[in-house]
Amino acid sequence: MNNFISNDIFFFLTSIAVVACTVCIIVVTVYIVRILRNVKDLSETVRDEGKKITADIDLARQTVKSEGAKAISIFDSVLGILRIKKFTKKKNNPK
């Protein structure tokens, strides 16, 4: 009889421990799922911002190319004018 009561107490305590462990595992799982959702949202935000940065860099590259071409044409025009002046001075000064 004493052995039967000991077995009942053991199984009762074991059942309580299993339920407590199960509840703890469920709580931890819920927190892990929340963290993973936040990480997913964060990675989506980073991806979207990365696309925007790439678009901005492409726009800046296009602007530099177009403005650079304008600057080169202005620079070439100035050099052309200076060469003409230099050439006419040499032509007009016979030594």
Image (cartoon, rainbow, N blue to C red):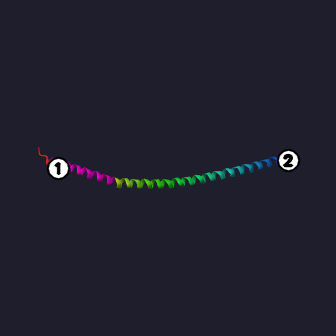
Of mark 2 and mark 1, the one earlier in the sequence is: 2
Q: Main secondary structure of the magenta part?
A: helix
Tell me the quadrant of the picture where the C terminus can be found: top left
Amino acid on which disc 1 is placed: Thr
Q: Nearer the viewer, residue 7 or 36?
A: 36
Neighbours of disc 2 within 10 Å: few (<14), some (14-19), many (20+): few
The picture places residue 56, in percent across and down from the top left corner, at: 44, 54
Q: CA distance from mark 2 to mark 1?
A: 122 Å
Amino acid on which disc 2 is placed: Ile
Q: Nearer the viewer, residue 26 or 44?
A: 44
The picture places residue 90, in percent across and down from the top left corner, at: 16, 47
- SS under mark 1: helix
Q: Is residue 81 magenta?
A: yes
- SS under mark 2: helix
Residue at screen point 19% across, 48% down: 86
Q: Nearer the viewer, residue 95 or 69?
A: 95
Question: Which residue is label 1 attached to?
Answer: 88
Question: Which residue is label 2 attached to?
Answer: 5
Name the residue at the top extreme. Answer: 95
Neighbours of disc 1 within 10 Å: few (<14), some (14-19), many (20+): few
Q: Nearer the viewer, residue 74 or 69?
A: 74
The picture places residue 15, in percent across and down from the top left corner, at: 77, 50
Q: Is residue 21 magenta?
A: no
Name the residue at the right extreme. Answer: 1
- Labels 2, 1: front one: 1
Residue at screen point 85% across, 47% down: 5
94 to the left or right of 26:
left
The picture places residue 14, in percent across and down from the top left corner, at: 77, 48
The answer to whether the residues at label 2 and label 1 have Cβ atoms under 8 Å apart is no
Stretch in magenta: 68-90
